[in-house]
Image (cartoon, helix red, strand yellow):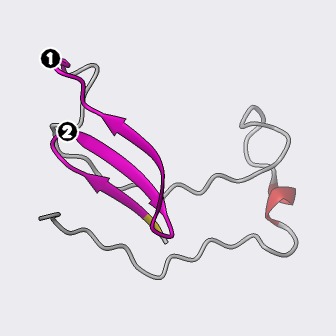
Amino acid sequence: TYAVEWSHDKVSFLLDDHKYHEFRKESGANWEAWPFDKPFHIILNIAVGGAWGGQKGVEHAAFRGEGQVMEVAWVRVYRLR
């Protein structure tokens, strides 16, 4: 389970309750250093492999075979207390 915990002074990224990365707001940080004071949208990005890197469009062979599925059971957003 992936999680992002977002507070006024830090953003933490977790996988199965293990924190693997964290951004902390430094004292006096402006909006360029800390843009997380504004509303954001959740985007579930499907990054697909292949050898083209988008230069020639979609490489349809990257979708063939087993394991080419992204399943999202649910997305939950709630306020930390």
Residue receiving disc 1: 28
Tell me the kind of residue under disc 2. Answer: Asp
Determine whether 54 is above or below 29 in the image.
below
Q: Nearer the viewer, residue 30 or 24?
A: 24
Residue receiving disc 2: 9
Tell me the kind of residue under disc 1. Answer: Gly
**Residue at 82% of width from left, 57% of height from top?**
62
Q: What residue range appears in magenta?
A: 3-30
Q: Which percent across, then down, holds residue 14?
A: 45, 59
Number of other residues with Cα within 10 Å of mark 2, as a class: few under 14, some 14 to 19, many 20 or more: few
Asked whether residue 15 is drawn in magenta, I would say: yes
Determine which quarter of the picture holds residue 24: top left
Q: Secondary structure at mark 1?
A: loop
Determine which quarter of the picture holds residue 46: bottom right
Q: Secondary structure at mark 2?
A: loop
**Residue at 40% of width from left, 79% of height from top?**
74
| Image quadrant where one finds the C terminus | bottom left
**Residue at 40% of width from left, 63% of height from top?**
3
